[in-house]
Amino acid sequence: MNKPTGIDPRGPRFGATITAVLLLVTVFISIPLATAPIDTEAPGYVLLVVLSAIFLWGAVGGVQQSPYGLFFAKFVRPRLKAPEFVESPAGPTFSQAVGFIVTITGVLLYLVGIPAAVPVAAAVAFVAAFLNAAFGYCLGCEIYLLFAKRGITFGLEKAGTPRTTRVGSDHNI
């Protein structure tokens, strides 16, 4: 039996938990920005910029190479039992790109004078991160699958990497 290729699905969920917490903090500390003059040193704005950069890192480098993915692989994963299944990193990586698009939109709209964009973008991204963290429902992955079913994979599918494979079996889910 060959060792299945793919990622431990608990890794992206771990990252989503950290992201959800940080986005919720961003929402609450950036609410006052919605009615204040533009301030690029405001903590809510700065935190959204940092989260945008983390999303970009995960989208460009792959979800396994994001800061949360690296932390999970080094410190969390070794303490867990083997996963029941592995999944392709394509969906979670695409999700990082969606997160980047949402958060960078908030950043850019804030810079052009729409102060409410920061808390709104953070709230939208929070909903997606929370769904993954709390329920294991990856909204970005579902969007990716809609494209993948039509043959559009954005170059994310790697040869030999199944979408999802149960450990100990030869079938894809």
Image (cartoon, rainbow, N blue to C red):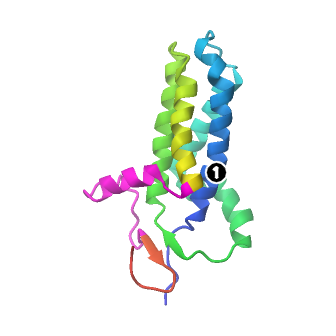
Quadrant housing the C terminus: bottom left
Magenta segment main secondary structure: loop
Looking at the rendering, the stretch of residues picked out in magenta corresponds to 135-163
Residue lying at 63% horizontally and 45% vertically, measured from the top left? 19
Q: Residue furthest front?
A: 135
Residue lying at 28% horizontally and 59% vertically, measured from the top left? 149
Considering only vertical position in the picture, is 115 above or below 57?
above
- Residue 72 drawn at (x, y percent): 68, 60
Residue holding disc 1: 17
Considering only vertical position in the picture, is 8 above or below 35?
below
Q: How busy is the neighbourhood of tag 1: few (under 14 within 10 Å), some, or many (20 plus)?
A: many
Residue lying at 35% horizontally and 52% vertically, measured from the top left? 154
- Residue 142 drawn at (x, y percent): 40, 54
The foreground one among 96 and 120 is 120
Residue lying at 60% horizontally and 64% vertically, measured from the top left? 10
The foreground one among 158 and 123 is 123
Considering only vertical position in the picture, is 151 above or below 117?
below
Amino acid tagged 1: Thr
Considering the numbered disc 1 on the image, is that residue within a helix, a strand or a loop?
Answer: helix
- Residue 106 drawn at (x, y percent): 52, 27
59 sits to left or right of 48 = left
Q: Is residue 160 magenta?
A: yes
The foreground one among 94 and 16 is 16
171 sits to left or right of 61 = left
- Residue 107 drawn at (x, y percent): 54, 26
Q: Residue furthest top?
A: 37
